[in-house]
Amino acid sequence: MSAVREPDLYKCTVGFVGVFDLNLMLTEGDIPTRQSGREYLARVLPDTEDERNAQSPVHNLDKLKAPVFLIHGAEDIRVPLIQAERLRDALEERNHSWEWMVKEDEGHGFYKPEHNVERWQRMLRFFNRYIGSEYQAAE
C-alpha cells in the first residue's frame, strides 16, 4: 500500500504473502473462522466496505506506478492465495508490470531453504532491473 500512497517514492515493490484486499480478510482464510479472529478483524479493519476499499491496494491501482513482484504460498490459510491472485489479475487488466512466484508447498511465509534462496535471488534480480546493479543477484 505504501507504493500506492506514495507512488513517486518507489521504483518497484514486492508483495510477499500480502493482504491486498481488506474485504477478503472477512471471508477468506482461517482468521474469520474463529471468534477471536472475527473480534481481531473488527478491531483492526475499517468499519465499512468503502473504507476497507480505500485502504486496499487492489482497489487503488490507478495510483500505482511501480512494477510489482508478487510472492505467495499456495497453501497459505492465514492470507490465502486469492489475495495475490486478485491483485495479479487487476494488474494484468491494467497492463501494469508484474512478476509472479507461487510455491505450491508453502504457506504464510516460506520455510524451505531452497524456496527462500530462490525468492531472494529473484527479488535481487527484480530490484536490479528497476533500481540498479548494486542489487545484482548471484546466479
Image: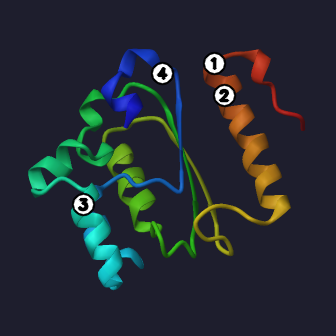
Q: Quadrant of the N terminus?
A: top left
Point 90% across, 38% down: residue: 139
Q: Which mark is residue 43?
A: 3
Q: Say which element carries label 1.
A: loop
Mark 2–mark 1 distance (CA, rounded to whole Å): 5 Å
Work out whether mark 4 precedes mark 1 in sequence or the reverse, and give the earlier one.
4
Mark 3–mark 1 distance (CA, rounded to whole Å): 37 Å
Classed neighbour count for the residue bearing mark 3: other residues with Cα under 10 Å, few (<14), some (14–19), many (≥20): few
Name above or below for residue 35 compared with residue 126.
Answer: below
Q: Which mark is residue 131?
A: 1
Question: Identity of the amino acid at label 2?
Answer: Phe
Task: Mark 3 and mark 1 in contact? Answer it, CB < 8 Å.
Answer: no
Task: Mark 4 and mark 1 in contact? Answer it, CB < 8 Å.
Answer: no
**Residue 42 point in image, percent of width and height:** 22, 65
**Residue 6 point in image, percent of width and height:** 35, 22
Classed neighbour count for the residue bearing mark 4: other residues with Cα under 10 Å, few (<14), some (14–19), many (≥20): some
Residue at numbered disc 4: 10
Is residue 58 toward the left or the right of residue 129 in the image? left
Classed neighbour count for the residue bearing mark 2: other residues with Cα under 10 Å, few (<14), some (14–19), many (≥20): many
Task: Mark 2 and mark 1 in contact? Answer it, CB < 8 Å.
Answer: yes
Task: Mark 2 and mark 3 in contact? Answer it, CB < 8 Å.
Answer: no
Task: Mark 4 and mark 2 in contact? Answer it, CB < 8 Å.
Answer: no
Residue at numbered disc 2: 127
